[in-house]
Image (tube, rainbow, N blue to C red):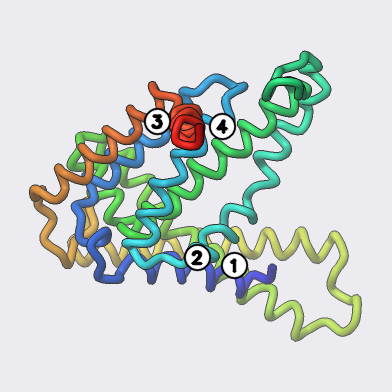
Amino acid sequence: MTLEAAYSDIGRLDRLSYLDTAVHRLDPRAKVIATMLFVVAVVSFPRYEVLSLLPFFLFPLLVGAFGDIPAGFIARKVAAVSPFAVFVGMFNPLLDPGIVAVSPGFSVSAGWVSFASILVKFALTVSAALLLIATTSFPGICRGLRRLGFPALFVSQLLFLYRYLFVLVEEAIRVVRARDMRSFGRRGTGARVFVRIVGTLFLRTVERAERIYGAMLARGFRGEGPSMRPETLRPADAVFVLSSAAWFALCRFVPVPQAIGRLVRGLAG
């Protein structure tokens, strides 16, 4: 993926947050709380649980459907960062050679089961985080965190990290484009040129970040981004949080797939 494509994808995620759907109109605090509960419920499962995690996919599917977020776009983003999860769990089959019975008469290595559990948890938590950004915007998430009582310094650092990510990518695109215009064939692609590009990129990014911060202070920035939408807790926000929490608790403490299987067998028999 080129830098231009990466920048376009980040910008698309940001543009999706300005849609006007039922999910987008929810208060950021409600979506932040629901996503936090979702992540806590997912990661609390034991390492050999895989089937019990599957009902949790209903939450990102519904949020994406009602928020008009393209499922393929979110799936591509999750797949793009999945090598990190693969690297974390790739040694499990070697370090955990025990045998786990998956079904009557079928057993597999415990390491493969824990590896699958890591991948499923990763897909669930990353997709939920991406949908939170796509339906709230990162500044909206920061405002929600601040109103939930998170420290102002922590929230400001998150806000600047997100803003300067765009600055870094924009400067990298300019530097790489200038290098391509001044090189022919394989010239200008060696290690020395790469080190110079990194140094130039660092200096230009710092200088531009300082100018941006000065302009923000001149416009009255006091650590919080302004909102164009009224953000007040409404009954719909409470319904969203309570219904989400009830579903997470049901999926966490009741084996939903096994219950559905027993119900199907009972209806068939």
Q: Secondary structure at mark 3?
A: helix
Q: Residue furthest top?
A: 98
Residue at 48% across / 41% down in the picture? 125
Residue 157, position as x, y percentages in the image: 37, 45
Q: Which residue is mark 3?
A: 251
Q: Nearer the viewer, residue 248 or 126?
A: 248
Q: Amino acid at mark 4?
A: Leu
**Distance in Å between CA atoms under marks 1 and 3:** 35 Å
Q: What's the CA distance linking mark 4 and mark 2? A: 32 Å
In the figure, 218 relative to 86: above or below? below
State which tag comes first along the sequence, 1 or 4. 1
Could you say which disc has been placed on residue 6 in the image?
A: 1
Q: Whole-Å distance between the Cαs marked 2 and 1? A: 6 Å
Circle 1 SS class: helix
**Circle 2 residues within 10 Å: few <14, some 14–19, many ≥20:** some
Three-letter amino acid code of the residue under disc 1: Ala
Q: Earlier in the sequence, mark 4 or mark 2?
A: 2
Measured as percent of width and height from the top left, residue 24 is found at 26, 61
The residue shown at (58%, 53%) is 78
User: How crowded is the residue under tag 1: few (<14 C-alpha within 10 Å), some, or many (20+)?
Assistant: few
Percent x, y of residue 111: 74, 23
Q: Inspect the image, locate mark 3, and give the three-letter code of the amino acid beneath it.
A: Cys
Which residue was labeled with disc 2? 10
The residue type indicated by label 2 comes to Ile
Q: Are marks 1 and 3 in contact (CB under 8 Å)?
A: no
Q: Which residue is mark 4?
A: 51
Whether pointer 4 and pointer 2 mark residues with C-beta atoms closer than 8 Å, the reply is: no
Of the two numbered discs 3 and 2 on the same chain, state the one appearing first in sequence. Answer: 2
Q: CA separation, marks 3 and 4?
A: 11 Å
